[in-house]
Structure formats: C-alpha cells, structure tokens
Amino acid sequence: MIARLKKLLSASTTDTLKVGVDEKKIAIAALLIEAALSDETYCDDERAMVSDVLKRYFDLSDEDVAAVVTEAEAAHAKATQILHFTRTVKETVEFDERVEIIEMLWEIAYADNVISDYEANLVRRVCGLIYVDDKESGNARKRVLAKLKIAE
C-alpha cells in the first residue's frame, strides 16, 4: 500500500491531469447522452447535437470529439446509474463550469424545441448531484431558450 501511495505521489502532474481531463470529458459527454436518451431515443441528430455541444465547450477537433463521444457511449452503456459521472464532474469541475454543463444539458433537452418531464427531471437531478442550485439552473435554462429562440 505504501509503495502504491509513493507511486501515486511521484507520478507526474501532467499524467494525472491528462487522465482527469479525459475522464471529465467522458463524464460530461455521458451526461449529455443521458439527456438525449431521456426521451428513450438517441438518433443521429441527437448524437450530432451532443458532438456539437462538446466541440464548442472543449474546443475539440472533429476527430477528438468523435473519440470522446464513442468512449462516453461505451461508458454510458456499461453504467447502471449516473452517479459515477456526476461525481466525476463534481470533483473535477469548478462551479462556473458546472453551470455551463447544466446549460449544455438544457440545450440537449430542448433540441427538439419541446421538453419532456423526464428531461426536466434529469436536469434537476443532475443539478442536485453536482451542486448547482435552482436559481443558476433556471438562468441557464433561460439562456438556452433565448439562444434557441424558444418562447416560454
């Protein structure tokens, strides 16, 4: 155990950071996929929307975003719940970025200009799990509605 701790502490920070960053991207992508799936469909259009949102947020190339989405889809398929993904976000993402993630979730939820009870419930649940309050979530939702030009 002590040897393991020494190895962990002696590992270079860039290696540790790289693993954390990739894990963070995959966790966020998996949450977006969950939002896309909350109406029980995950079509090519929704996959493209998830890719577009990730590309904008992380400033990724088409190749990189495709790799993240593929890994996130595999992780999501193996997962029985979203707690691993929300824990990763909560532990690796600053508050302002978590609010941006909620905004991304609202954007995916409103992709078809209509929000179902399941989609709204998922966003509220994720908010609680990553410690984003209702006021911030509401403001994020309003920004998405304005961006997508959807009337309330």
Image (cartoon, rainbow, N blue to C red):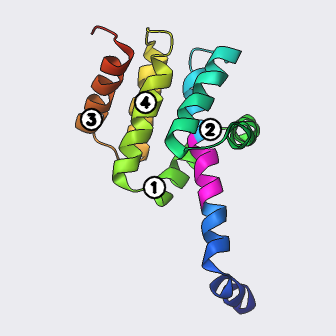
N-term mark: 3 or 4: 4
Residue 94 vertical position relative to residue 83 in the rendered view, above or below: below
Q: Residue 11 appears at what percent x and percent y?
A: 68, 82
N-term mark: 1 or 3: 1
Most common secondary structure along the magenta stretch: helix
Residue toward you, 122 or 144 = 144
> With 23 as the anchor, is 87 left or right in this view?
left
* Residue located beneath label 4 in the image: 123
Q: Secondary structure at mark 2?
A: helix
Residue 120 vertical position relative to residue 29 in the rendered view, above or below: above
* Residue located beneath label 1 in the image: 93
> Which residue in the rendered view is the most extreme toward the front?
61
Which residue shows up at 62% across the image and 19% down it? 46
Residue type for callout 3: Asp
* Residue located beneath label 2 in the image: 30
* Residue located beneath label 3 in the image: 134
The range drawn in magenta is 21-28
Q: Residue 130 appears at what percent x and percent y?
A: 42, 47
Q: Secondary structure at mark 1?
A: loop
N-term mark: 1 or 2: 2
